């Protein structure tokens, strides 16, 4: 059973690498069709190989200083924030299409303090799902999302 799990992980990793390789080949083939692209293609490939080698060296040197537990805790939380932002965008689009009611729109207005249309507010909205004037359905779904995440995390910790 352990072997089949390892094979599955190896197969998924191989497919991901193959997909990226195929995209690179298609991209480079398209560049190669341009006039006088040979020298630029060769220099770009050499530069890419050099940067990949430097990145591998830097990662190899720096990994010994990395606290893996903290790294995965932070990256996991960031992924949950990104998922919340995608959820908020999806809810906004469903409201826009008329598939979800707004219930109360807006529940509050914090645009005077921090507007989500400003450059910094747009970054916050993209990464966390922040809305200066959210509807009640969005607030409800957002709260249910985070409560379910906390419940799932608590359940995982209790089962360890």
Image (cartoon, rainbow, N blue to C red):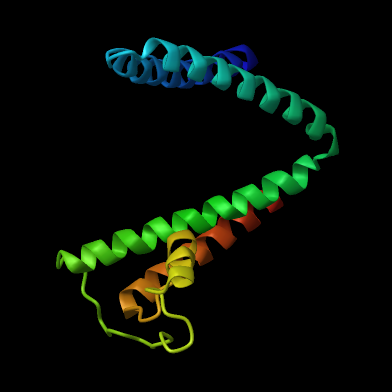
Q: In which quadrant of the rendered view does residue 155 lie?
A: bottom right
Residue at 60% in and 16% down: 6
Q: Is residue 87 above or below residue 6?
A: below
Q: Give the position of the C terminus as an image quadrant.
A: top right
Q: Is residue 145 above or below residue 73?
A: below
Left-right relation of 60 to 26: right
Report the residue at 37% width, 21% height from top: 23
Q: What residue lies at 49% left-to-right and 20% top-to-bottom? A: 44
Q: Is residue 159 visible?
A: no
In the picture, the quarter occupied by the N terminus is: top right
Q: Is residue 139 above or below residue 65?
A: below
Q: Nearer the viewer, residue 134 or 132?
A: 132
> Percent from the top left, x then y, of residue 111?
41, 85
Front in this rendered view, residue 95 or 44: 44
Task: Residue at 75% x, 24% y: name it.
Answer: 57
Label total for image: 0
Image location (x, y in percent) of residue 119: 44, 69
Q: Residue furthest right?
A: 65
Question: Where does residue 97 sit, x and y in percent of width and height?
Answer: 15, 64
Decide if residue 49 is in sight here. Answer: yes
Which image quarter: residue 51?
Answer: top right
| In the foreground, 72 or 59 | 59
Left of 62 or right of it: where is 151? left
Picture coordinates of residue 125 (x, y %)? 43, 66
Q: Residue furthest left?
A: 98
């Amino acid at each position: 059973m352990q072997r089949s799990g390892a094979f599955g992980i190896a197969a998924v990793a191989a497919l991901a690498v193959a997909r990226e390789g195929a995209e690179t080949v298609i991209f480079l083939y398209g560049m190669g069709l341009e006039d006088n692209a040979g020298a630029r293609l060769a220099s770009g490939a050499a530069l890419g190989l050099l940067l990949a080698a430097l990145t591998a060296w830097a990662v190899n040197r720096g990994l010994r200083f990395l606290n893996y537990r903290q790294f995965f805790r932070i990256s996991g939380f960031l992924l949950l924030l990104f998922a919340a932002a995608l959820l908020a965008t999806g809810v906004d689009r469903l409201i826009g299409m008329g598939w979800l009611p707004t219930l109360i729109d807006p529940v509050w207005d914090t645009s005077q303090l921090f507007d989500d249309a400003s450059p910094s507010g747009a970054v916050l909205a993209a990464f966390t799902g922040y809305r200066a004037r959210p509807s009640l359905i969005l607030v409800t779904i957002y709260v249910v999302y985070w409560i379910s995440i906390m419940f799932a995390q608590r359940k995982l910790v209790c089962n360890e």
